[in-house]
Image (spheres, rainbow, N blue to C red):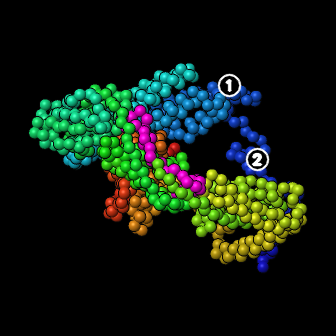
Amino acid sequence: MTRLTLACCALLVLAAVAGAVGPGTAAGSLQEQGEDGTNGTAQPTRHENPNSANGEGDMAQVERWLVQSLADRLGKSAVRLESGEYDAARRLLGDEYESQLGRLVEVSGETNTTRTYERTRKNQREVVRGASRYDRTLERYREAREAGNETRARRLARDLQRISRNVNRNAVQTTEGYDRLGSLTGRNFTNATRATTAVAENISQRQAEIREASFVQTDLATIAEGEDVSFVDPLTIRGELSMENETVVADREIALRIGNRTYETTTDGEGEFAVEYRPTLLPANASNVTVEFLPRRGSPYFNSTDSLPVSVEQVEPNVAVERSPKNASFGTPVTVSGRVTAADRGVRVPVAIRIANETIARGMPSDDGRFAVTVPLPASVPAGNQSVVAVTPLRGRAIASAAANATLSVASTPTRLALNGTQVNESAIAVDGRLTTDDGRPVVNRSVELALNGTVATTVRTDENGTFETTVPIPESRRDDATLLVGAAYGGGGTSLEAARAKARVELATAGESLLGTAALALGALLLLALALGGWYLHRRDEETEEEVLWTDESSDESDGTVDEPTAATEGSEHSLDRARELIERGETNSGVVTAYLAVRERLSRRGDVDRGRTHWEFYAENVENVSADEADSLQDLTRAYERAAFAPGRLPESLARRVVDAAGRFDGSDDEPTEGTTAD
């Protein structure tokens, strides 16, 4: 061994002994250095602009500064938006805006002002996103026109129409937010209002030109045989579809949206048609109903609408429900099926399935009113005889709310607890364990109480594998004990799971033994490290003659050499689609399609402020205007397949399931807006 190696060993040994037994120098007592360069002992003043906050922490002055700063960000973002600098406009409403708004809430509380700042930010971000999306889609539209691909050009023109409509709607909501903020804060939003309005008007003008160049305008004229209408007493609507030059659209299959329902029919040689309208979700107090001609995406015709007066009579449907099996326990697949009818005709309205007052599924039946869903029985359903309820959760609609129930006998399920405990230092022990059923299935998201010598110390929650782990402080009065009894208890209250208990005895080391053990371990580890460093140094000296390698404290500023993990948005989506394909490979086509649908729904929910409580068709209607043409088609196919998989009897064909899951892969986030600090492609 060289002198250098021996010297390193000596220094490391001294450092180890000093670190292990020296007073007040344990690693755990080191103070972290703050971002401002302090050692953590002094707390920096929070929320105050360094140029305006005084030593007394003038909160009113801080509040005024935050209010003005947020107003400035909204205004500057609007100006950048008008000039087409979308990334800059977005960044001004990004993390720093959110941080300042959070500080304002801390200073002043949640008020009309803070809520309006948040709503206006969301609306303005949507305007920025829509304007950016419009420009990108417009470029693809022009490329399609130049290439002579008129069908694709028309599809893109319809995308542009939807985007334009959304931009205008969000722009109106944004300028209304400016008005409210001006009244609440006294700040001037004149320039922001002018810029945002100008962007919306510019897009509307360009869209009018595209509409004129891409589509043939149509005219829809309708009449009805009376005004009274109900699901059991339908209204016959007759109409004529013509072009703006009064040439009729003859002998064509067309789609009409009446209220919220879509009907397919065919025009005759005179461009005339007739449909029988049975309202379901039309408000019961509606005085008119809108009829809209819906051209296909590649059609040369443009939408047209008409309105008819109506008087709605509400109808109460009949709901029938069955469950299989009659007896179940935690995790048992339970199938709930049935039908919604009125006057012996199937009714297609939302249905919710509840067991013991817990909603376990919801969705839309098939056209004939039939539904079927299979779900594992949740642990939260208590043991005993429980009601399985199928309900149409409607209020104030043409179809009233109705319900039916069946009885399910739920058996209790025994559980097991495994528990381990290890002392980590003189003042704490590490505890880990697992909660499972008696046949080894994990029990997820359940509370487990941990106790030391019979006294409850803390409560932990099981993860997706039924496991838990935590560190529990040892009471000072027990630190000189030779052993410590650790107990774990799961109560099972409010569930079908039975209670379980477990205990483990932990041998405790005395404080002196702990310190000597720590010092010995540190010394041994450092000696090994010293030997390794000595060998490494000699090896490097043999190879390097012109450069000497030195270890310095600056290495802490370098990259740790790891690769960033995938973001939750992409990782979760990719994992779910892989899982969907695995399920289809195993023949579980319905489960695979449901998994793919939920992955896409979560993806779209992250793109904007979407109400996650909507039914699948409500979710489709809310999102179809915000996605590309290809995505819109995929979303419709996926929603239809999900409906069949979740609610209709029978198994989906494997070819259909594979096609739908492949289409779900289009929602990979490539069309999302860049986040703050990134740039758009």
Q: Residues within 10 Å of mark 2 (few under 14, many from 20)?
A: few
Amino acid marked by disc 1: Ala
> Does the segment drawn in magenta span residue 474?
no
Q: What element carries label 1?
A: helix
First in sequence: mark 2 vs mark 1: 2
Image location (x, y in percent) of residue 298: 23, 45
Q: Give the range drawn in magenta.
A: 377-404
Question: Is 46 on the left or on the right of 299, as rendered?
Answer: right
Question: Is 260 on the left or on the right of 463, as rendered?
Answer: left
Amino acid marked by disc 2: Asn
Q: Residue at x 33, y 62 (%)?
A: 653
> Does the segment drawn in magenta span residue 393?
yes
Q: Which residue matches tag 1?
A: 60
- CA gap between label 2 and label 1 equals 30 Å
Q: Which residue matches tag 2?
A: 39
Q: Which of 409 and 290 is in front in this view?
A: 409
Q: Residue at x 31, y 37 (%)?
A: 231
Q: Which residue is drawn at 12% across and 34% down?
A: 247
User: Can residue 59 be seen?
Assistant: yes
Q: Which of 345 and 103 is in front in this view?
A: 345
User: Can residue 604 be seen?
Assistant: no
Q: How many labels does the image show?
A: 2
Q: Which residue is drawn at 58% across and 55% down?
A: 384
Question: Is 40 on the left or on the right of 635, as rendered?
Answer: right
